[in-house]
Image: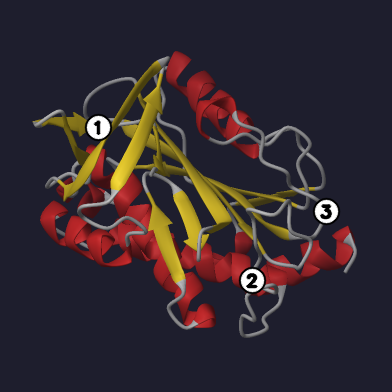
Amino acid sequence: MSFPEYVRAVGQTWPGGGSRLVVLKCPASTHQLARRIVREYAEENVEAPACDFLAWQQNAGRGREGRRWLSPPGAGVYVTLIRPLSTAPRRAARAVELQTLPVLVACALAETVNERLGGKCQLKWPNDLMVEGRKLGGILIDVMSRAEDAAVSVISFGVNQTGDSQGPRTTSMADEGATPVGLAEFAAQLVAAVDRALAEPVKAEDTVAKYRTLSHHRVGETLSWRAGGETLKGIFRGFDHRGFVRLEVSGKERLLTAGEVTQSD
């Protein structure tokens, strides 16, 4: 499929008819573009409108902590969504604490992926879609605001579609034998799932309960944690009511709100 063919296919499948959709051939990063737009609106004391950015490829995609995320042409879904969280029809999202927004989005994406993978996809805290220890996709979320009642989320995610895996620790929908579906249709399904999750009133504890069932981590296993130059090693004791990791270190519990965790011996 070529880029023009992709644009046409997306226009035919996108939620809402694509009226707020921008398809880009090769942006550096849709996430950084969306952040810039939200920031420029905020500088004028105006809330940025909902908008969808979809890339055919990216040459400077980034994950958490600035890690590079390869986005080869036509090989995956590369999406960034601008979603105001304080205006209709998304007032319901305010019922979910902003701290649990990443959990909400992760569950929506994993459940949609699992419709094609038969339940094999799990979630590695805080933002990775995994299949048997191999990374299938990633999520990056920023919440930006000019006032408490004017929060705007920038939600980005990438999911590998074809067998062009990025390395031995990555995988794709095709590699995992997913039920075939076109790239444009798959992207539309994922975005629709995220929008449904944002629009439905839901309690934070219900969202976290769902996340627990999809978690790649198991209570009692040893995890290593790293963030900002600090490292810890301890026993995973589960998630709290916001989806934060409870890690037992030297007999005392630490609550991890961000960072990178990996299984350890």
Question: In the rendered image, is residue 88 in sight?
Answer: no
**Which residue bears the numbered disc 1?**
256
Residue 73 is marked as 3
Whole-number angstrom distance, CA of label 3 to CA of label 1: 36 Å
Could you say where residue 41 lies in the image, as x and y percent from the top left?
Answer: 49, 23
Q: Residue at x 17, y 62 (%)?
A: 209
Whole-number angstrom distance, CA of label 2 to CA of label 1: 30 Å
Please tell me whether mark 2 sits on a helix, a strand or a loop.
loop
Q: Nearer the viewer, mark 3 or mark 2?
A: 2
Question: In the rendered image, is residue 168 in sight?
Answer: yes
**Which residue bears the numbered disc 2?**
173
Which of 248 and 185 lies nearest the eye of the viewer? Answer: 248
Q: Residue at x 32, y 65 (%)?
A: 214
**Based on the displayed image, in which of its 4 quarters is residue 14 positioned?**
bottom right
Residue type beneath disc 2? Met
Q: Report the quarter where the N terminus lies.
A: bottom right
- Earlier sequence position, callout 3 versus callout 1: 3
Q: Is residue 100 above or below residue 74?
A: above
**Based on the displayed image, in which of its 4 quarters is residue 212 positioned?**
bottom left
